[in-house]
Image: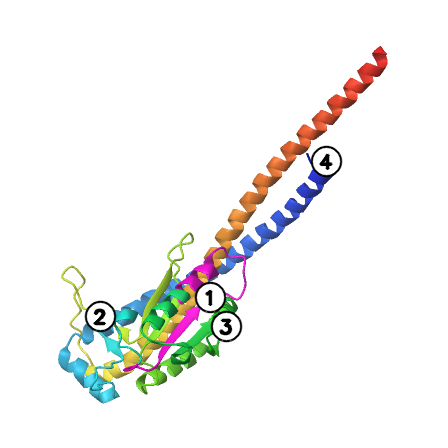
Amino acid sequence: MSSLKEIKSRIASVKNTLKITSAMKMVASAKLHKAQVAIGGKLPYEQKLHHILSGLLQDDDLHKAMHDELGFGNPDGHSAIALQDVGLDQIPTKDVYPRIAVVALSSNSALCGAFNANVIKKYQETISVLEGQGYGPADIDVYVIGRKIADAVRKSGYAIKADLSALADKPSYDAAADLATDLVDSFTSGEVAQVVLVYSHFASPASQPVIRENYLPLPLHDYDEGAEEPIDYLLEPDPLTLVKHLLPQVLLLKLYTVLLDANAAEHAARTLAMQVASDNAQDLIAELTLAYNKGRQQEITAEILDLVSSTLA
């Protein structure tokens, strides 16, 4: 059994740790509130623009005209948009499309539970699927946002096309616009055939699932029978001009929203992790205090017995 001095020292150490985890929880909670406000204001706007664009492009003639006007109507069907999401296992092999781009987002720091581990796992799954399609390290452009995923990419033997880890802590609209422009230019020029996003989604303060989805081609889903029907808008000056301006805006807002979403998920994960750590510290303090009191009681009892024995003798 540990001595009382050792137990007392452990209690003091755990109390100091509790102060740190409690402070980190408060900081993460404050940042989470700010991030929730940002994503809560931006996500509905981005989704509505996406919905409007999807509704407009249900018209096959407009869809074709937009492709021809913007130069996306390639004979092989390589288009900037798709009416259904294109899975990684549905794209042709590297013999047809020689390059793929992957954009992975993590945090810059640790102490956020399994947040980074889950992103790294999903990234590794994505690379495994692409390698199954015949792609190798020389055929995949990896863009990283976050030092943790950057370290994982380097360890996996893949070169990093661009490291934008500063955006993990402070999402910037201008930086998101620059990255979106680079990705769109690479896609439209035919340099890459698909751009895939891997990031954590802020579903709730207690849930941050990792999502893998296409950035390009941008999926514009068909409407099911039970889904909301597209609105018949009155458009000025004409549908094609509107779509030409709307598509770049949707692509930019999509990437910026993903940055805000991943940032909110990180703060939520860290808040939860620090709450769990604080609870565990409090439980450990209670156990150590009980052990200390029992040990102290045993020492007092032993001293009393020694005193009584010496008196009787």
Image x and y of residue 15, in percent: 64, 45
* Amino acid type of the residue tagged 1 in the rendering: Ser
Distance between the Cα atoms at labels 4 and 2? Answer: 67 Å
Can see residue 237? no
| Bounds of the magenta segment | 95-123
Mark 2 or mark 3, which has the lower sequence index?
Answer: 2
* Amino acid type of the residue tagged 2 in the rendering: Gln
Distance between the Cα atoms at labels 2 and 3? Answer: 33 Å
* Amino acid type of the residue tagged 3 in the rendering: Arg
Q: Is residue 114 magenta?
A: yes
Q: Residue furthest top?
A: 312
* Amino acid type of the residue tagged 4 in the rendering: Ser
Question: What residue sits right under mark 2 in the picture?
Answer: 84
Mark 3 or mark 4, which has the lower sequence index?
Answer: 4
Question: What residue sits right under mark 4 in the picture?
Answer: 3
Instruction: Determine the secondary structure under disc 2.
Output: loop
Quarter of the figure that contains the C terminus: top right
Instruction: Determine the secondary structure under disc 4.
Output: loop
Mark 4 or mark 2, which has the lower sequence index?
Answer: 4
- In the drawing, what numbered circle is on residue 154? 3
Quarter of the figure that contains the N terminus: top right
Question: What residue sits right under mark 1 in the picture?
Answer: 106
Looking at the rendered image, the disc whose residue lies closer to the viewer, 4 or 2, is 4
Looking at the rendered image, the disc whose residue lies closer to the viewer, 3 or 1, is 3
